Amino acid sequence: MPNIFNRLRKKESLASSQVPIVDDSPDASPISRRMSLPTPMNQRQSSRNWGPRAFTYANNMSRRSTSHRRSTLEGGQVPELTKMQPAGLRQPWLVFQRSILSSWINVLLLVIPVGIASHPAHFPDVAIFVLNFFAIIPLAKILGYATEQMSLHLGDVLGGLINATLGNVVELLVGILALVKGEVEIVQTSLAGSIIANLLLVAGSCFFFGGLKNNEQVFNAHAAQSYGSLLAMAILSTLLPAAYNSLNAKDADLKSGTLTLSHVTAIFLLIIYIAYLFFQLRTHVNLFSAIPLQDRKAAALKPKKVDADEEKNVDSAQAAETAVATTAATPENTASAATSHDQINVIEESAIADNENNTTVDEEDEEEIELTLWASIVLLLITVGIIGVCAEFLVSSIDGLTTSWNLSRSFVGIIILAIVGNASEHYSAISVAVKNKMDLALGVAVGSSIQIALFVTPVLCIIGWIIDQPMSLYFSPFTTVVLFVTVLLVNYIIGDGRTNWLEGLVLIISYTIIGVAYFLYPKDVDTLSTSLN
């Protein structure tokens, strides 16, 4: 009996001596808190002699090291990272600080008072246009920030839909103000320019900048196919009036028929838009769900070069493991097998450490809610009101701008006004694309084009019908061709549900070529092809 107890005591003392050392100090790094691996010479002996008491001690030490990270600052211990509390309506200064002072582009907010005062002070039209142009850009940034905060409360699908809808407030306000003034051509070119800019410039920027950080980005292919079919429907509504006007008939009959066809088509487009909302938010929500985070991370991983030493160690370890499986269990073979297992364990644990570090970085990149839902709504309403004032002065100065700078009205509507109107989509869509949230970015960029084609355009067409303005869906043949090619190109790119930076660069360069073409657009044909007066 004494011999038995002595053997048990020896085993327990040997097991306790083999317990991994854990650095449990508060200043210890996460790597040093991990259990140190036994040396290769003692690996076999420690694996045989570790008893339940040793594993229990190791688990307790691991829990104690975790409790250090979750403790408070008292006693010199490491505090737990707490989430930012969202600012509400009772904290107006905090809302102001987070929304206004959060971006360097908001320095342009200083231009807003000067831009609003420029019109009553009778500044030159060029100065009024430029001041209000730069005033709308930070306002669109704040508008995008408010809608992005709303999307965090409402989810990716509904959030992307609201983000795209409210992001088109600038286009809707500019269109209504220009339509009341009888600027039908400006309304048509700004709508077409918004569709082109969203599909080529905004989506292209998302694909490009997101692809620079991530190897490849994935999104819901079913949602992309639905977007493509809706965009094709929108292009059909512009192709039919253009084909109708090519008929050999009297001009009066063509003008009357084009307006009637546009009004009827606008009503059906609104029906399609309502059905699209019901389809997306009620009956087929699963088709528009975001791709799981694991799949997005797997696609975003860039291939790494494996060092020659690591590859040699892995090959030798695999060869030794194969030899063990086919060779008798002699002492020499057992020792070599243990050594190979040591190498495999070291490699596997280093990979686990890398994955843990990557997971920590990804969790830190997750966006936090900074504003409450009602605070973001109030901020959005205030921003929309200021944008409406600046848009009014912007539209009233277009004639003086085109005369002073010798620009065509098509270039102003297609390029300049489209860039102003899509500033919010640029900031919000690119920011979420870089964070590998491509479903939300696609919902903002492509979804915004669908909103303009199926909602804003028919609404303005019906408003023109009510106030007796010849607003139709008949665009110039050149603009119709550009719209058709744009939709065709984007459908090719988003059809497979995957994208990279090269496809984004293709879209950006395509938009640049279109911009050069409209810059060279002759001024004397601006009012010939689309005038229905």
Image: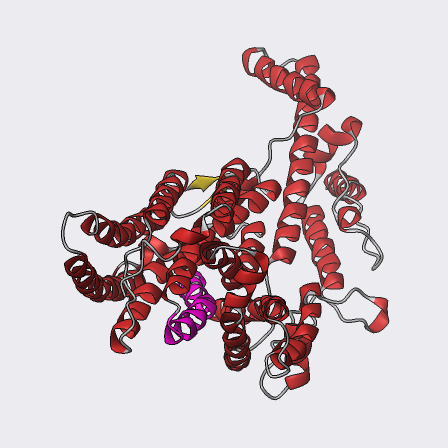
Query: Residue 331 sits in which quadrant?
Result: top right
* Left or right of 400, for residue 245: left
Above or below: residue 226 compared with residue 452 = above
The residue nearer to you, when weighing 520 against 354, is 520
Coloring basis for residues: secondary structure
Above or below: residue 187 compared with residue 246 = below
Query: Residue 289 sits in which quadrant?
Result: bottom left
Determine if the magenta segment contains residue 175: yes
Dominant secondary structure of the magenta stretch? helix
Quadrant of the image containing the C terminus: bottom left
The residue nearer to you, when weighing 298 against 399, is 399
* Left or right of 370, for residue 469: left
Quadrant of the image containing the N terminus: top right
**Which residue sits at x=68%, y=31%?**
347
Q: Position of residue 403 (x, y in %)?
A: 54, 61
Question: Would residue 442 be visible to someone looking at this image?
Answer: no
**Residue furthest bottom in the image:** 90
- The part of the chain drawn in magenta is 155-182
**Which residue sits at x=58%, y=38%?**
301
Determine if the magenta segment contains residue 404: no
Above or below: residue 110 compared with residue 77 = below
Q: Position of residue 38 (x, y in %)?
A: 77, 35
* Left or right of 135, for residue 513: left
Q: Position of residue 410 (x, y in %)?
A: 44, 55
The residue nearer to you, when weighing 323 against 408, is 408
Question: Would residue 234 be visible to someone looking at this image?
Answer: yes
Q: Position of residue 341 (x, y in %)?
A: 66, 26
Exactly how many numbered labels are in the figure?
Answer: 0
